[in-house]
Amino acid sequence: MSPAAPDRAVRTAAVELTALAIAVRADWSEDVVAGTIQRGIQAIGWPQVLTRLPALMKDPSKVPGDLLAGPRDKTRIGISDHPRPANAEFRAAAKRLGAAGTVAEALTSTTREDPR
């Protein structure tokens, strides 16, 4: 068996997995699924793609991009399950938006209000 044989087998299986995925999930785009599988093979390896994609196909809330979304590493700085409180500038912009009525009006507003 030549070194290229496994690559050819994986490419063939990836095409078949793509066909299966779009047959099972008619709401998924063939191009998106094929691209996600190829990125998955490079990022997480064929065995992981082969086991994760069928699990995604069963869940109607999942999309092909979830294949590459691994578990979150909560030990990394800046990752939290809770949203950060909005800073004063954000609160002021939100207040201007509420008063202005449109995003464009809020962005062009030069009034700086107290966010509290």
Image: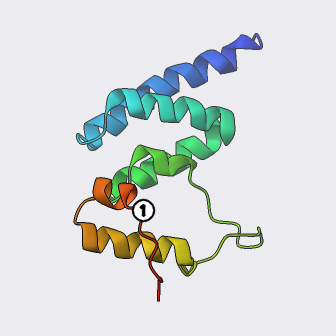
Q: Amino acid at mark 1?
A: Thr
Location of residue 16 in the rendering, given as x and y in whole percent from the top left corner? 42, 27
Split into 4 quadrants, where in the image is the N terminus? top right
Q: Secondary structure at mark 1?
A: loop
Percent x, y for residue 98? 28, 73
| Frontmost residue, 24 versus 33 | 33
Residue 39, position as x, y percentages in the image: 58, 33
Query: Which residue ends up furthest to the bottom in the rendered image?
Result: 116
Q: Is residue 60 visible?
A: no
Q: Is residue 78 left or right of residue 100?
A: right
Residue bearing mark 1:
110
Front-lying residue, 2 or 98: 98
Work out whether residue 43 or residue 6 is closer to the camera in this orientation and state it. 43
* Res 98 seen here: yes
Task: Write down the quadrant of residue 6 in the picture.
Answer: top right
Using the image, determine if residue 35 lies above or below residue 65: above
Q: Which residue is at 37% across, 61% downward?
A: 109
Tell me which corner region of the image, top left, top right, bottom left or bottom right, holds residue 38: top right
Tag 1: Cα neighbours inside 10 Å, few (<14), some, or many (≥20)? few
Near-viewer residue (105 or 20): 105
Identity of the residue drawn at 32% across and 68% down: 97
Judged left or right of residue 96, residue 66 is right
